[in-house]
Amino acid sequence: MTSTFTIAIDGPAGAGKGTLARRLADHYRLNLLDTGLTYRAVAHSLLRLGLPLDNVSAAETAARQVDLAKLDRAVLSAHAVGEAASKVAVIPSVRRILVDKQRAFAKTPPGAVLDGRDIGTVVCPDADVKLYVTASAEVRAKRRLDEIESIGGTANFDEILADIVRRDERDMGRMDSPLKPAADAHLLDTSEMAIEAAFLAAQAIIDDVLAKRNEA
C-alpha cells in the first residue's frame, strides 16, 4: 500500500470488533488502535488520582497526556475502568482532544485499523472501509460470561446483561458522537457468526475496495 489505508470498525461492547480489528490489522499489516483504551486511560488516570469522573479540567489534562504508544491493555481492561470510561467519554472537550490524537494515528503510514464507537461517523468519516460490528445483547452477555469463566472467574449472566444494556443506552444516547452505524458502513451481525466467519466477510469487503483502488 503506497498511501495510507484506513479501516474504521464501530459497534457496541462485546460484539467482537476488537478481535476482528486485531485480525485485520495483522493480515493487512496496518497499525492498530482500540480507541476505547484512550478513554479508559483518561478514566484510569482520574481513578488513580482519586478525582471525580465529572471533573472536566482534570479529565482534559489527563486526555492531553494520553500516549497512544503506551496504552496498557492489561491495566485498562479492568471492569471498573470500563465503567468509569463510559462516563468520561460523555465530556465533549475530552472527546475532541482524543479524536485529534486518533486522527493523527490514522494518518500515520501505512494506515490503520481503528475500532471504537464513532470511528466511521466522527473520527475517520473518510475511512476507506467502514464496518459496523454488532450482536444481540444476550449473545454479548453470554460471551462475556464465558470469557470470565474461562479464566476461573464467576459472574452472573443477568447482571452482565443489565450492564451491557446500560452501556448501550449510554453510548447510543449521548449527545456528542453517539454510537450508530455510518451511512456507508457495512453491517456485520456476529450473533450467529464465529470470528473466522466475521474475518472472512470483512476481508472480502476490504479486498474488493483494494482491488477497485488499484484499478483506479
Image: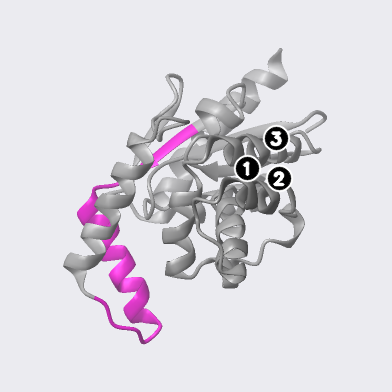
Task: Evaluate whether residue 23 shows in this view.
Answer: no
Q: Quadrant of the C terminus?
A: top right
Name the residue beneath numbered marker 2. 30
Pointer 1 with pointer 2, Cβ within 8 A: yes
Q: Residues within 10 Å of mark 1 (few under 14, many from 20)?
A: many
Q: Quadrant of residue 185?
A: top left
In the current view of this chain or complex, which residue is farthest to the bottom?
152
Farthest top residue in view: 216
Closer to the camera: disc 3 or disc 1?
Answer: 3
Residue 55: which numbered mark, if any? none
Q: Amino acid at mark 2?
A: Leu
Asked if the stretch drawn in magenta spans residue 144, the answer is yes
Residue 188 on image: x %, y %: 37, 38
Q: Quadrant of the N terminus?
A: top right
* Among the two numbered marks 1 and 2 on one chain, the one whose residue lies closer to the N terminus: 2
Give the magenta-colored segment's residue range: 131-155
- Dot 1 corresponds to which residue? 113
Tell me the residue that label 3 is attached to: 100
Against 74, residue 115 (above or below) is above
- Residue drawn at point x = 50 percent, y = 53 percent: 18
Looking at numbered disc 3 in the image, what kind of residue is underneath it?
Asp
Return the x and y of residue 70 as percentages of the image width and height: 74, 62
